[in-house]
Image (spheres, rainbow, N blue to C red):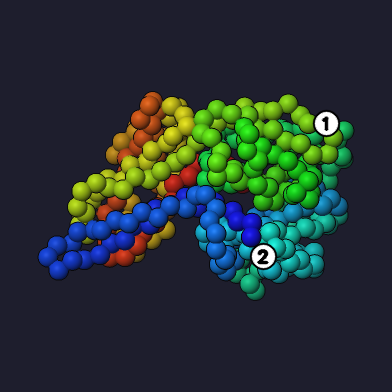
Amino acid sequence: MVEASAVQSRAMDIRLPRISAALLVAVCLGGAASAGAAGPPHSIVLPPLLVAEAPATIAVLDASGRLVPGVDVALSDGHTIKTDATGRARLVVPAGAGELEARIQDGSIVATAPIEVRPTPPQIQVTDFPPMIDARDQFAIFGERFQGDADENHVSLGNNTALVLAASPAALVLLPAPETLLGPTQLRIEGNGPAPEPVDVTVVEIDAINPTGPLRIGEAATLIVRVRGTTQPLEVDLGNWSPTVIKMLGPTGGTAEGNSMSPDPNVRRVRTSGGENNEARIEIVPLAQGKFYVRAHLPRPPS
């Protein structure tokens, strides 16, 4: 089975011994794809831009980021497609500008993407790409004359091939290979026609480091966010996936500029310090026993 892991989080197990409220922390990293059957569908990955009357590929992921085969996806043009053994499905985008909507599980999981009418350019071009790429997360590039069939695009970061999750002639959604090296590298793409010049990117890895020492319910502790692969200060978004088990407070380290309090108490943005120890710190307060997950990733581009 082909698997994709777009989740980088830490699972921490909080238990209450009879004498004290010490938190026993067990780390469980997402990251490299692992063997095992995929769980139920959790999200649909569409190319962020579709081209009218052109082929496209979409993907369905479970909560751990694994591709899910055999899922029926209902499209807003009235067609239903099913993901194949790789967890992806091909379609032809309807004519005319507008928006395509995809739904599964009676509409409980929905994704949409805009449709543009555009001519076919003479050659492949990469027009927009992220300069920083999270080694454990999916990312999108935009351009011209990509292949709507995901497998007909050949994209590499350095010497390692990236997995194409979703594709259209105007955009690709990619996931770095687990063995991709951190640091400055080049992104290359081949497909229909002469290959464009490679573009310079930097691959980074973001870790949420466990608080040190005994932790107690109701007492603040410091979570460290560490970036490897660059010495540049970076903004990092943290998501609390277990709000009944912990709450996140404001950042306590890194640089003051860029640290922010989101209106959502379960989302925080920190800015790392830069340098060899490229870190930021944020306080968490345990609320109850159980496992909790903190998701650390580069900020998403505005939709």
Name the element at disc 1.
loop
Q: What amino acid type should be assigned to the residue bearing mark 1?
A: Pro
Q: Residues within 10 Å of mark 1 (few under 14, many from 20)?
A: few
Residue 63 position (above or below residue 191): below
Residue projecting furthest to the left: 19
Q: From this viewpoint, is residue 251 visible?
A: no
Q: Identify the residue at horizontal 74%, vertical 49% (top origin).
A: 150
Q: From this viewpoint, is residue 85 visible?
A: yes
Q: What amino acid type should be assigned to the residue bearing mark 2?
A: Pro
Q: Identify the residue at horizontal 73%, vertical 41% (top origin).
A: 154
Front residue of 172/69: it is: 69
The residue carrying mark 2 is: 69
Name the element at disc 2.
loop
Residue 87 position (above or below residue 278): below
The residue carrying mark 1 is: 194
Q: Identify the residue at horizontal 31%, vertical 61% (top origin).
A: 13
Marks 1 and 2 sit apart, C-alpha to C-alpha, by 33 Å
Q: Where is residue 242 in the image (x, y as percent from the top left)?
A: 38, 61
Earlier-in-chain disc, 1 versus 2? 2
